[in-house]
Image: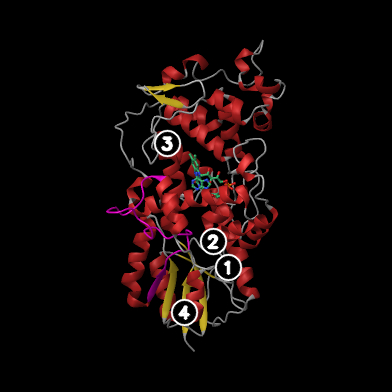
Amino acid sequence: MTVAVVLFTQDLRLHDNPALHAARTAADQVVPLFVTDPAISAAGFDAPNRRAFLAGCLTDLDASLRRAGSRLLHRRGDTAEQTARLAAEVDAVSVHVAAGVSGYARRREQRLRRALGDRLQVHDGSVTAVPPGAVTPAGRDHYAVFTPYHRAWQQVRRRTPLPAPRTLSTPDGPRGTAIGEARPNARRLPEAGESAARRAWQRWHTESYAQLHDDLAADGTSHLSPYLHFGCLSANELAHLAERREGPGAEAFVRQLVWRDFHHQVLAARPAAAHADYRTRHDRWRTDEAELAAWQQGRTGFPIIDAGMRQLAETGWMHNRARLLTASFLAKTLYLDWRLGARHFLAHLVDGDLANNQLNWQWVAGTGTDTRPNRVLNPLAQADRYDPDGAYVRRWVPELAELPGREIHRPWRAGRRPAGYPAPLVAPDAVAQRLREGREIDKNGSAKES
Ligand code: FAD
């Protein structure tokens, strides 16, 4: 009997899983492994919401593997050491893992390679729909601009999604440790794991996505981001499934998956973009602990910003439009370092993802891939546009609920300030002056270059 090990990382699923599929083809028996590595906590990356969600994903993966006749072996320690030890225990002919994009994932691969030599097989196209580097512009190792990347992405022949294995055979011998539970700091998290992810996709309708995806109160986006982050759903399979649904909603949804691939190929080529400016503009960020704390706590006095920050604290998730507005407020209006904001997001987001978070923050801060780095989002104009009757703010900032219609976006105009709600951190008519020198807000709420 030959045995192969499959090391699960950001691919916690049975469907369309190239590493699992290859392990099953390579040997008579498969040992599915997940290693909880203290290096992730040391890097400050295992925030309570994601730790709790991950535990649920692993429990669900174990249950699905058991239904197929196998089980998930969970171990704690250094990933390369634990994997090599298991490979020796079961005399594995090969070890299979999905290719990752972060610097951490790259180093992990190198260490696995040193420990396992040729027995290690790294599988592309598992974390993203199109693998980083599969399309590149002439003379460069990655695309720095989204639109040409999108065009090139559409020309790629993507692999046909792989079915989930119906049966798996696993040797009795090797033992693991309990997955354990973790306490989130959000009030309620979405149900974790591949089974819930597939139900969520089935439940969600793409039809109105094109019209509604920016409407804050309608909350019409898929909420699939945590499942994509942990690989409970394959981006490749999801793109195929969405394309079958057709229509402008499905097209708009696939475009967002392309944004995801875009940021991943940037990070894969420039791992330092996780902490350093991708394109520095020599910002000299201000330091203001009180302003940072007010932003983090949802007490800036700008209702649309506070609503987003409170949605994040309470649910571990935030609507994309609110992420754009809150990030722009921190980096462009308060002119505080984008890294402070990105760190706070990563401490709370259940979908917190190095590629998507850091590169979206850089996009907003003007240090990333935006072709208009001076773009500034005016919180008031944006609130009028994307929360026209104030329903989103009313949901998350209850102390303002009495203010009618869009008046809720300007509580300073009310006869007396609503009890318990702070005065604006920046005088509303001085928002523009607080912007970085050389930037100016136009009437529509986006910036023009001065
Ligand atoms: P949908 O609109 O249904 O989109 C479907 C999927 O496409 C998402 O699940 C996501 O995987 C991908 N996607 C959508 N928008 C983007 C985008 N702008 N960039 C990359 N991928 C995208 N997304 C994360 O997954 N993790 C993060 O840590 C993260 N941090 C962000 C920080 C900032 C400052 C901003 C502006 C955006 C961030 N995003 C992040 C992108 C986006 O806000 C979320 O992916 C989206 O809100 C998740 O909701 P959804 O699944 O309902 O999205």
Q: Which residue is mark 4?
A: 4
Position of the C terminus, as image quadrant, is top left
Which amino acid type is shown beneath numbered disc 3? Answer: Leu
Q: Which residue is mark 3?
A: 340
Could you give the CA–CA distance between mark 1 and mark 3, rounded to whole angstroms?
A: 37 Å
Q: Earlier in the sequence, mark 2 or mark 3?
A: 2
Could you give the CA–CA distance between mark 4 and mark 1, rounded to whole angstroms?
A: 18 Å
Q: Nearer the viewer, mark 1 or mark 3?
A: 1
Ligand 1 within 8 angstroms of badge 3 C-beta = no
Could you give the CA–CA distance between mark 2 and mark 3, rounded to whole angstroms?
A: 30 Å
Secondary structure that dominates the magenta span: loop
Colour pattern of the rendering: secondary structure
Going 44% across and 76% down the picture, which residue do you hit? Answer: 86
Q: Earlier in the sequence, mark 1 or mark 3?
A: 1
Q: Are marks 2 and 1 in contact (CB under 8 Å)?
A: yes
Q: Earlier in the sequence, mark 2 or mark 4?
A: 4
Is residue 81 in view from this perspective? Answer: yes
Estimate how packed mark 2 is, as few (under 14), some (14 to 19) or many (20 or more) residues with alpha carbons within 10 Å: many
Estimate how packed mark 4 is, as few (under 14), some (14 to 19) or many (20 or more) residues with alpha carbons within 10 Å: many
Ligand 1 within 8 angstroms of badge 4 C-beta = no
Which amino acid type is shown beneath numbered disc 2? Answer: Ser
| Image location of residue 246, percent across then percent down | 62, 54
Q: Which residue is mark 1?
A: 15
Tell me the tag on residue 234.
2
The answer to whether residue 149 is magenta is: no
Q: Earlier in the sequence, mark 4 or mark 1?
A: 4
Extent of the magenta region = 120-146
